[in-house]
Image (tube, rainbow, N blue to C red):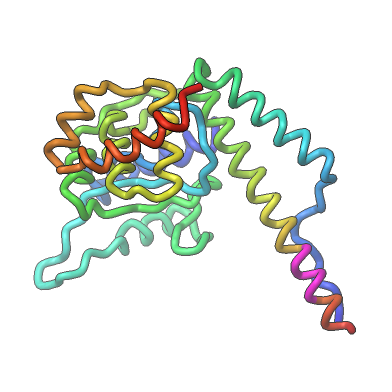
Amino acid sequence: MKETPSPFPLPDVAILRKALFEAKLKKRHGLRQASIIEKLRVLEEMRDFTAALRGHREANKARVRSAWARK
Amino acid sequence: MLATLRAIKVINQLRDEGIISKYAIGGAVGAVFYIEPAQTQDIDVFIHLEAKAGSLLVSTGPITDRLRELGYTRWSEDRLVVEGWPVQFLPAGKLIEGEAIEAAVEMPLEGGVSAWVPPAEYLMAMAIDLGRPKDLLRLSQFHLERAYDPEKLKSLLERYDLVPKWERISALFESAGDE
């Protein structure tokens, strides 16, 4: 069976961790005083980040399923 | 212009065209106007929706039809995606939701775009009423950031018989300790 190609490029785990850390840092130290526009921008970043993670997880699941099917 | 502003602009267009009447943005996007941003995947828009004469069911058909005409044809589960945001139109089924729409205030943003958002106390009361884990998280943020008027919240909760529920929830925050 052919491997299902992922619709999302697989992000490097270190990059994801860094982004998550930065988001947490930003959240903790900067956003209480941020403007609404800045907060909406962060909201969009968080949404896209979660979507990428979800895509990454789904792609992994598909790969595992496909590997099992080949056995 | 930010995608969220473009999405709000489309919602305002629906209102200006009479497809919907006054609306109120709730959920995490509404809460951003008062507290720090929290993870969300959609924009919740509370609207008044009346059933057609002779029908017991309300329909969001006219909204989705108009959005399709405007070129928004992609769905994310049961929500049409508008400018990158799945938008959920929620007919106000509870009295407090209807009142939140009426109490919504205009929040000017950028480029002449404004959003209509309920006062913080209404967002909190609706979260207390629902009481899901994500609502408790949002309530804890309102509590930690002191982003509401306790007197206004109290009078709202008394009217909707939500005081005992809020006392249980706020006791959790107290026992967990503030920042």
Q: Name the residue: 55% across, 21% down.
A: A31
Q: Name the residue: 15% across, 42% down.
A: B160
Q: Nearer the viewer, residue A54 or A21?
A: A21
Horizontal relation, residue B50 to residue B47: left or right:
left
Q: Quadrant for the C terminus of chain A, please.
A: bottom right
Horizontal relation, residue B71 to residue B10: left or right:
right
Predominant secondary structure, magenta span: helix
Q: Name the residue: 41% across, 55% down.
A: B67
Question: Is the residue A60 above or below the residue A39 in the image?
Answer: below
Q: Nearer the viewer, residue B116 or B155?
A: B155
Q: Residue furthest front?
A: B175
Which x, y percent locates residue B36?
49, 27
Which residues are the magenta region? A60-65
Whether residue B92 is visible here, answered yes or no, is yes
Which x, y percent locates residue B137?
45, 39
Which quadrant would residue B148 be assigned to in this image?
Answer: top left
Q: Quadrant for the N terminus of chain A, please.
A: bottom right
Q: Nearer the viewer, residue B143 or B77?
A: B143
Which x, y percent locates residue B79?
45, 58
